[in-house]
Image: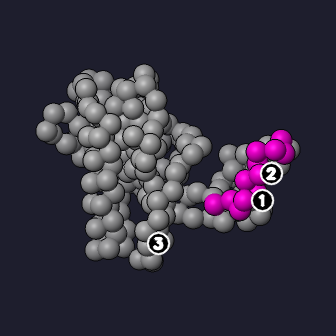
């Protein structure tokens, strides 16, 4: 079984590799790695797949089957995505005002985070998202960036991670943010 430290190292190394690719190419393709022993198997896929619920379901369904069949020790998924930075006042309203929180969640879920930001729920940012999963842990690591080569080199947490987040199968342990372990 892989340790938290090993999973964190995979997360950092993968993020560093993607940042190098971004500097060289100003773009990257989403990637999935299967880890078994000292072997990393890479699967790159079309970024448009992440914009289609049906395509995502098919892709991550296949990843789950491959992880099970190959008895992968970990699965690493690297994508990009949107996040919203809330002001302290917005954070407070999200915690305390059920109607405000429900409206934010509705817009974010049905229309997307860019629309939620446009509706005044916070500042939109784009991030590289690295998820490293083992049967016991899931490490989530994000770094803000802009495709124009501007990288603010700050880390933030994907605190309300939703989506197809158990690529290795049912999570038996707990989700850790990168600085918790």
In the rendered structure, which disc, 1 or 3, sits on the residue that comes first in sequence?
Answer: 1
Count residues near mark 2 (Cα–Cα under 10 Å), then give few for <14, some for 14-19, many for 20+. Answer: some
Distance between mark 3 and mark 2 Cα atoms: 27 Å
Q: Is 81 colored magenta in this rendering?
A: no
Which quadrant of the rendered structure holds the C terminus?
A: top left
In the figure, 72 relative to 121: above or below? above
Q: Locate residue 115, reporting x and y percent.
A: 70, 60
Which secondary structure, mark 3?
Answer: loop
Mark on residue 152?
A: 3
Asked if the residue at tag 2 contacts the one at tag 3, i.e. Cβ–Cβ closer than 8 Å, the answer is no
Is residue 86 inside the magenta stretch? yes
Q: Residues within 10 Å of mark 3 (few under 14, many from 20)?
A: few
Image quadrant in which you'd find residue 73: top left
Q: Is the N terminus in the top left, top right, bottom left or bottom right quadrant?
A: top left
Question: What is the distance, in whole Å, between disc 1 and disc 3 at their CAs?
Answer: 24 Å
Do callouts 2 and 1 mark residues in contact (Cβ within 8 Å)?
Answer: yes
Boundaries of the magenta span: 85-98
| Residue 145 x %, y % | 47, 68
Q: Which residue is mark 2?
A: 93
SS class, disc 2: helix
């Amino acid at each position: 079984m892989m340790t938290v430290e090993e999973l964190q190292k995979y997360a950092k190394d993968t993020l560093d590799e993607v940042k190098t690719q971004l500097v060289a190419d100003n773009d990257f393709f989403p990637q999935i790695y299967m880890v078994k022993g000292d072997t990393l198997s890479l699967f790159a896929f079309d970024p448009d797949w992440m914009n289609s619920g049906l395509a995502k379901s098919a892709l991550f369904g296949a990843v789950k089957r491959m992880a099970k069949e190959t008895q992968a020790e970990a699965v690493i998924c690297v994508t990009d995505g949107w996040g919203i930075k809330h002001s302290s006042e917005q954070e407070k309203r999200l915690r305390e005002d059920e109607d405000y929180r429900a409206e934010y969640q509705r817009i974010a879920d049905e229309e997307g985070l860019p629309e939620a930001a446009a509706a005044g729920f916070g500042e939109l940012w784009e991030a590289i998202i690295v998820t490293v999963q083992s049967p016991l842990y899931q490490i989530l690591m994000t770094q803000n960036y802009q495709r124009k080569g501007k990288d603010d080199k700050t880390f933030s947490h994907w605190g309300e991670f939703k989506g197809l987040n158990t690529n290795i199968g049912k999570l038996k342990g707990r989700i850790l943010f990168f600085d918790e372990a």
